[in-house]
Image (cartoon, helix red, strand yellow):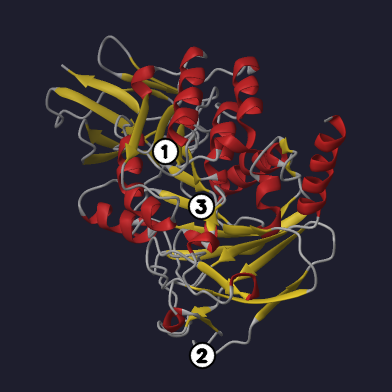
Amino acid sequence: MKKITLLLILFAFQYTFGQITLKITAIPTNTPTNASIYLAGDVNSWNEADPNYIMQNDGLGNKQITIPEGVGSVNYKFTRGTWASVEGNATGNFRPNRTFTFTGKPQTVNLTILSWEDLGGTSVNSTAAANVQVLNTGFFIPQLNKSRKIWLYLPPDYNSSTKRYPVLYMADGQNLFDNETSFSGEWQVDETLNTLFNQGDYGAIVVGIDNGGSERLNEYSPWVNTQYSAGGKGDEYMQFVAETLKPYIDSNFRTQPEPEFNALIGSSMGALISVYGGCEFSNKFEKIGVFSPAFWFSLSDLKTYISNNTNSVANLRMYFVAGQNESSTMVSNINTIKNNLISKGVSNNEVFTKFDSYGTHTESYWRGEFGAAYKWLFSKTNLSIQNGYNSSKIEIQQLNSGEIILKGLTDETSFTVFSILGKKIMTVNYFNGIYKLPDTLTKGLYFLKSDDILSHKAIKILIQ
């Protein structure tokens, strides 16, 4: 009996040892939402809608199928269920058969579908709004010794105001603003924020960081997943975001650099690294947007990290959103990590979870959820006054007499008086000394702020 069992094990091992995994990593942007993609070829008599050969989501935003060990070469193509909707070339026309060859060793083949014959070519014009720019096509990452494309969204009034803005640092920058660069449709972050701004939203800067393609799994997890032989560079990636990129953005743009005004947002693996980044750099990012997180990739390691983490997470505000049926463990994994975070000090009132019956692991789903997540994350944050860095060198305070005293200024400085609602009331010029506030101010609470002093917060003043 033992010999029979051993033979069965050896047979199964030989059967799977040379298997081939076909992985689709990019599909046309005009692919219908939730379309099933089939493999048709020599392995299934060229059945264009074989239910046994539907490409499956891998939990990382790709679609894949594993073909057991065989011999020789196999011809195949991808369809959406009919030969009319077979894949085409870049112009939407006929493309030759694809081919793979069994070698006796396991293989993973990454593939791109360029078009569907019934939908035409995939060439599209840029859909990025006018207030989106590529900050740098090759921003250097010293922690990883490589470069990456960085996108920048500036609010509509950035060039016509002196406001300082919160900043969203978002993973998978290719998919945020432009159909031309996206995997399977963009998030429309720019259109969403522009619409909200027109409806009265204060505005925010968005920094989109392109993923590293084949390095995406490595950079979006601090821990190695042995099954995928990937991960382990997430700590270096987050050091780049927190210690290299954020200081650059804060130095070159009008940001509100305190952690309460800075967010990390991502989906799938990008959500995993965002949660890690919020815990590891809670002194820099307090708002975390978590879309369909791939917690399964490093669940045990993440749980252990949260339990052992000595950084304070008490000020984190976190938004979790996912589809109920994205995977069998999606909802339970989110609840597990949420509870772990709460046990470490995150307030239950500062965590929001949303599980949708219609949710899918797709850009289109995340696009529809982005606006609500952004508004909730900043719903308790006072953005009406443009706060800056704290400074120990400058002292501004109101005396019991109602006068204000200023110390540490190096020159006469212009200050703006704002109402409690953020309305600009007047401008006054002060240097070091004690000053009586203008008689024209009526009783009430005001804020005193200078944009010339980039390192000083707004000061509350009370007129009695």
Could you tell me the amino acid type at mark 1?
Thr
Marks 3 and 1, how far apart at CA: 32 Å
Residue at point 21%, 49% (across, down)? 200
Q: Residues within 10 Å of mark 3 (few under 14, many from 20)?
A: many
Residue at point 56%, 85% (across, down)? 89
Give the mark, 3 or 1, whose residue is nearer the N terminus.
3
The residue nearer to you, when weighing 348 against 399, is 348
Picture quarter containing residue 317? Answer: top left
Q: Residues within 10 Å of mark 2 (few under 14, many from 20)?
A: some
Picture quarter containing residue 281? Answer: top right
> Badge 1 is on which residue?
413
CB of mark 1 within 8 Å of CB of mark 2? Answer: no
Q: Is residue 173 visible?
A: yes
Residue at point 48%, 62% (across, down)? 51
Could you tell me the amino acid type at mark 2?
Asn
Say left or right for 205 vs 399: right
- Residue 147 vertical position relative to residue 120 in the rendered view, above or below: above
The residue nearer to you, when weighing 27 against 373, is 27
Give the mark, 1 or 2, whose residue is nearer the N terminus.
2
- Residue 282 vertical position relative to residue 72 in the rendered view, above or below: above
Q: Looking at the rendered structure, which numbered label has been put on residue 93?
A: 2
Quarter of the figure with the N terminus: top right
Say left or right for 43 vs 450: right
> Badge 3 is on which residue?
207
The residue nearer to you, when weighing 241 against 216, is 216
Q: Position of residue 263 (x, y in %)?
A: 47, 39
Residue at point 54%, 31% (across, down)? 278
